[in-house]
Amino acid sequence: MPKNSKVVKRELDDEVIESVKDLLSNEDSSDDAFKKSELMVDDQEEKDVDVEEGSDVEDERPAWNSKLQYILAQVGFSVGLGNVWRFPYLCQKNGGGAYLVPYLILLLIIGIPLFFLELAVGQRIRRGSIGVWNYISPKLGGIGFASCVVCFFVALYYNVIIGWSLFYFSQSFQHPLPWDQCPLVKNSSHTFVEPECEKSSATTYYWYREALNISSSLSESGGLNWKMTICLLAAWVMVCLAMIKGIQSSGKIMYFSSLFPYVVLLCFLIRGLLLNGSVDGIRHMFTPKLEIMLEPKVWREAATQVFFALGLGFGGVIAFSSYNKRDNNCHFDAVLVSFINFFTSVLATLVVFAVLGFKANIINEKCVIQNSEKILKLLKMGNLSQDMIPHHINFSSITAEDYNLVYDIIQKVKEEEFDSLGLKSCQIEDELNKAVQGTGLAFIAFTEAMTHFPASPFWSVMFFLMLVNLGLGSMFGTIEGIITPIVDTFKVRKEILTVICCLVAFFIGLIFVQRSGNYFVTMFDDYSATLPLLIVVILENIAVIRIYGIDKFMEDLKDMLGFSPSQYYYYMWKYVSPFVLLCLLVASVVQMVLSPPGYNAWIEDTATEEFHSYPTWAMIVCISLMLLALLPVPIVFMVRRCNLIDDSSGSLASVSYKRGRIIKEPVNLEGDSTSLIHGKSPSEVPSPNFGKNIYRKQTGSPTLDTAPNGRYGIGYLMADMPDMPESDL
């Protein structure tokens, strides 16, 4: 025997024995006999960071500083701009208070179960989206890559919206606000109001002309808007600095970015309730229209909102959850975050309709005054008789109720000539029925309402700072959904990857800060995420329930939580959620086919929006966005199915972990496609046989059914153990 053989054997013994503790930590609690083995292991509490002493390569898994920090991160990711400018619109459009019924039902059927599923797999496997699905089946590793691609597409345009909010925030430190009045144009002879502004409104003009300087069509790029380019750069710098250290840096920022929006919403609600007309807005919002609730479109839009409100399929939920301890109660987290999200949407809806009720009241008062002046002119001209007007009506201080009384009388008496009189019905409900969402709500309707607030600059600063924080909270989760899986898979430095990702995204994002950039934002919002994410979540459900096995998954949950989860989730995951998701996918495809693909272009001459169909090249871009997002799924499947990649080249499946040291070995993925890693044969690895030494069982102890997979998700490198069965994963 060579003189170094004992040294080599001792080193290998140390390495294998060191890994035993991690292997034991993942065994089911029921394997008592196995845990009472003759093998002596230090009874040391398992730590989240396992690093071999003297190792020059560390595989440290960061952890949240506290449970509160983690909950705030998940809340910040799920609660975003959609809660403020999408949910109120859907509530108004789809039956008011009645819309809450289908929303709550779908939250219980698909929202909480699927959110719980993503939290659980992230916490159980402690990897990002790529590692998680590769763990379950290498053939489904493309699901994680698809999530990363969708996250990148969404991040590209989502940060542009943060840039818009930063621009308005920077312009709010002046009194009066710059969008308060239409600008005046001077020429050599006289001064007049800007025609484009006069035909629309001050806030509409400021949004389209001053902020975006928008072009008349998608094909007319118009060059870069330098103001928005600077704001986009500032937004990406903020994201990069917050994410450069991972959850160590972003986690601390969550305390402000997640909590500040609630402070602002509560302040706006209190202020809004004190405004004249706010109660009318809230009453309008909560008045149920039960007949609308029965329409299929309402349920489709409610399901879509539930789906996107919780951030399902993005990978951010899995990434955040992967930094938890294995015994964290992720079921409690899923229910808590889901209902926080729901109540935030309701709170935002109360605020929006209180403010819109105030705005509608002001517009209604102007309508009453203008039409009362018309009636006085008609009385002086003799077109109307004074006898029509009730004696108690005083046109100098007429109320909305009195005006509507006079309006009804004139309409009945002058039935044939009424249209020629040019009088309008001034009803608050008519104004509230004008549904607005998205940028139209945040940058036009809400900004117009705030101009009538006392101390309007203060409220404007608060509002747009809230939008920035809501956007950043969602961006942190979105970027984490890109960075964490790539770092876990390819072992690159997180700091370098974060900087590169933000730089690339900024330069690609320049297409959104052209004069035609708003149209590209609409295109990406409509086509880059909806269908791909639905397909991703359906595949996630199939991967866990069918391939991994729902019974084994329920056992894993029992091991993690310390109790068996309700059978409700068993039936939701196995039957109900997949069926509802498939129905939603079919409905979304039908809706996309039936709706003409296009966008609303702003026409400067008429100061109105006009629907334009996408040109051919734009349709190619739309289709390419969906295909690019889904392409990783079939590519990875075919690569794994046909063994097109040499496993010895360092692919994910050939990377094994021991304590803190990464060991790459050429392995063969053969036999069962769901097996994760197979050790070398004895002839290939000249090492002693430790199979009997590692698993020394007591007499009569049960046979170990499966070799445990490590906490890193893809197993440990084992020495030659011919009597050790393969993992059943």
Image (cartoon, grey):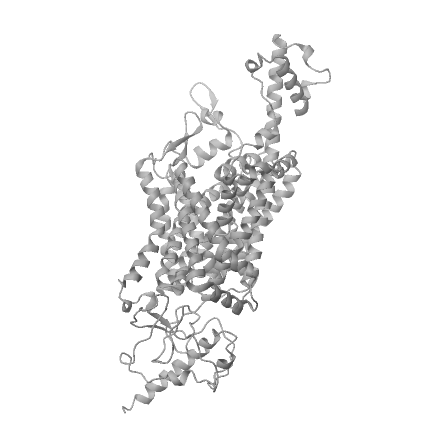
Q: Nearer the viewer, residue 468 or 167?
A: 468
Q: Is residue 220 above or below residue 710?
A: above
Q: How many marks?
A: 0
Residue 652, quarter of the rendered image: bottom left
- The residue drawn where x is 43% and y is 61% is 546
Foreground of the two, 384 or 703: 703
Measuring 37% from the left and 46% from the top, which residue is drawn there? Answer: 509
- Quadrant in the picture for residue 430: top right
Q: Is residue 367 visible?
A: yes
Q: Position of residue 4 (x, y in %)?
A: 30, 88
Pick whichever, 355 or 123, lies toward us: 123
Residue 471 rendering spot, x and y as whole percentages:
49, 48
Q: Is residue 548 above or below residue 535?
A: below
704 over 119 or under it: above or below:
below
User: In front here: 637 or 171?
Assistant: 637
Residue at 51%, 48% in the rendered image = 306
Q: Is residue 607 above or below residue 724?
A: above
Q: Is residue 325 visible?
A: no
Image quarter where the C terminus lies is bottom left
Horizontally, is 501 left or right of 649 in the view? right
Q: Position of residue 419 (x, y in %)?
A: 55, 15
Q: Would residue 450 be found to the left or right of residue 519 on screen? A: right
